[in-house]
């Protein structure tokens, strides 16, 4: 990762020409060098930027980039444990996830100011142990108009360092979700979830080969729906491989366990499980409930204590908002955040305590998925020329990392892996030759620098 960051900074320097050592990057380099020197006699100090204000001529997008460059440099300091808490930068001020600041040793405040033709960076370090400001520093550099234009250009990602499409093939229609898990022989198995069956594949070089399939039996009532949607969950519990499958056309999700070489019924739940998370050292199935026969979730998240066999009922709930798409990011099995696209296709973010936080300004989408507590993928809101946005959500932040164009409409996104590479599966509906014809493409987008 650090090698990729160094390459990113080198590309920025090359793209900006002469400003590598005299402009914005030099300003960031001076600030990072000062902080590195300040902390050099300390070991394993926990540090985060908690305030960043802009009084310069640069815009909010440029401020995010300057912040990212500073964070990238500080991540290279061996004696610093940096927590990246930035959620957004808007209206000249950074928004930080301060609920993640517990346990920090030092807090950093930054401010950019304009001094005639130069841009200045003010830096303050506050020690929580000493309960006082322990360092104040100011740096100043000339930032030309060309540098400002580059910083304020929206395209800041480089494909060599971002996510790339590594696999694409056609699937039959109505594929709703893809999940994967290592089989008993150590090989990855890929579960494709259709309304009436699950097909299991194994990888053979760059191809998927069918390994097994079985039918699904849904409980009545059975809700008619124009567009079937559903979520699949796979996890291991003691000696069992457990599978849950939920949809928008049945009020109950199926729970199956793989025992004695076959899938057996192990109960049902009255919501759609997304994750198995640990709270107070106890496992819980966490998920949502579709509006009957519709393609959106109701305004509740459900937490059901997990035990085999699984019984419906006994779940407690938390209020969010009606959601076209929803997922949960977690770290070490613990709930980190709830990511939601509401019925107006606006992105909304909730803390582990279900307090709504301020996300990226005007971020809209249609589908999303979280990969552990590190990455979030979100589709654009478009039917013919879609996009996938990849955001860094480590340490509770929300930072744009890369965007990739998609020819068609993204139907669903699922976190997963392919041949050892972590990333996201996407089901893409695309126009096919012939009047009114469509086809469903399966794509896998993986991160190149991992």
Image: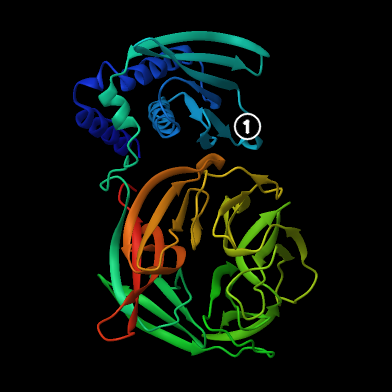
Q: x%, y% of residue 358? A: 60, 42
Element marked by disc 1: loop
The coloring applied to the image is rainbow
Q: What residue does disc 1 label?
A: 101
Q: x%, y% of residue 258? A: 56, 80
**Residue 275 higher or lower than 210, as above or below:** above
Q: Residues within 10 Å of mark 1 (few under 14, many from 20)?
A: many
Tell me the residue at 55%/55% (across/down): 346
Q: Nearer the viewer, residue 294 or 28?
A: 294
Q: Quadrant of residue 396?
A: top right
Numbered label tally: 1
* Residue 33 as seen in the image, left or right of residue 8: right
Tell me the residue at 68%/14% (across/down): 131
Q: x%, y% of residue 117? A: 34, 11
**Residue 102 higher or lower than 297, as above or below:** above
**Residue 66 higher or lower than 41, as above or below:** below
Tell me the residue at 63%/32% (across/down): 101
Q: Quadrant of residue 282?
A: bottom right
Query: If the image is split into quadrants, where does the N terminus sit?
Result: top left
* Residue 421 as seen in the image, left or right of residue 305: left
**Residue 79 higher or lower than 203, as above or below:** above
Q: x%, y% of residue 186? A: 40, 68
């Amino acid at each position: 990762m650090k090698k990729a960051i160094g390459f990113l900074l080198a590309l920025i320097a090359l793209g900006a020409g002469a400003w590598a050592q005299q402009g914005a990057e030099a300003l960031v380099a001076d600030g990072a060098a000062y902080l590195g020197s300040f902390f050099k006699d300390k070991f394993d100090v926990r540090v985060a930027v908690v305030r960043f204000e802009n009084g310069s001529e640069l815009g909010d997008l440029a401020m995010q980039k300057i912040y990212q460059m500073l964070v990238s440099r500080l991540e290279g300091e061996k004696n610093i444990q940096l927590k990246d808490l930035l959620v957004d930068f808007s209206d000249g001020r950074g928004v930080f996830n301060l609920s993640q600041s517990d346990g920090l040793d030092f807090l950093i405040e930054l401010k950019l100011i304009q001094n005639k033709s130069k841009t200045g960076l003010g830096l303050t370090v506050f020690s929580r142990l000493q309960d006082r400001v322990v360092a104040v520093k100011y740096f100043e550099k000339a930032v030309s108009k060309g540098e400002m234009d580059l910083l304020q250009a929206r395209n800041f990602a480089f494909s060599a360092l971002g996510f790339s499409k590594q696999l694409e093939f056609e699937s039959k229609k109505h594929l709703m979700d893809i999940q994967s898990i290592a089989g008993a022989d150590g090989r990855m198995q890929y579960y494709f979830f259709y309304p009436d069956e699950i097909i299991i594949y194994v990888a053979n070089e760059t191809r998927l080969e069918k390994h097994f399939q079985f039918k699904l039996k849904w409980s009545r009532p059975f809700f008619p729906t124009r567009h079937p949607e559903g979520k699949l969950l796979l996890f291991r519990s003691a000696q069992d491989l457990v599978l849950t499958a939920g949809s928008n056309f049945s009020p109950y999700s199926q729970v199956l366990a793989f025992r004695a070489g076959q899938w057996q019924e192990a109960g049902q739940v009255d919501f759609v499980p997304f994750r198995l998370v640990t709270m107070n050292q106890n496992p819980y199935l966490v998920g949502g409930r579709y509006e009957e026969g519709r393609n959106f979730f109701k305004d509740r998240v459900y937490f059901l204590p997990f035990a085999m066999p699984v019984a419906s009922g006994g779940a407690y709930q938390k209020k969010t908002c009606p959601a076209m798409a929803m997922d949960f990011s977690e770290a070490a099995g613990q709930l980190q955040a709830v990511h939601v696209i509401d019925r107006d296709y606006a992105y909304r973010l909730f803390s582990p305590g279900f307090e709504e936080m301020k996300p990226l300004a005007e971020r809209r989408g249609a589908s999303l998925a979280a990969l552990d507590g590190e990455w979030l993928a979100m589709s654009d809101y478009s039917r013919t020329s879609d996009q996938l946005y990849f955001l860094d959500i480590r340490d509770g932040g929300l930072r744009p990392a890369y965007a990739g164009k998609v020819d068609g409409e993204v139907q669903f996104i699922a976190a997963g892996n392919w041949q050892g590479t972590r990333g996201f599966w996407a089901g893409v509906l695309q126009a096919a030759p012939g009047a009114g014809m469509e086809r469903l493409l399966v794509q896998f987008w993986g991160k190149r620098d991992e």
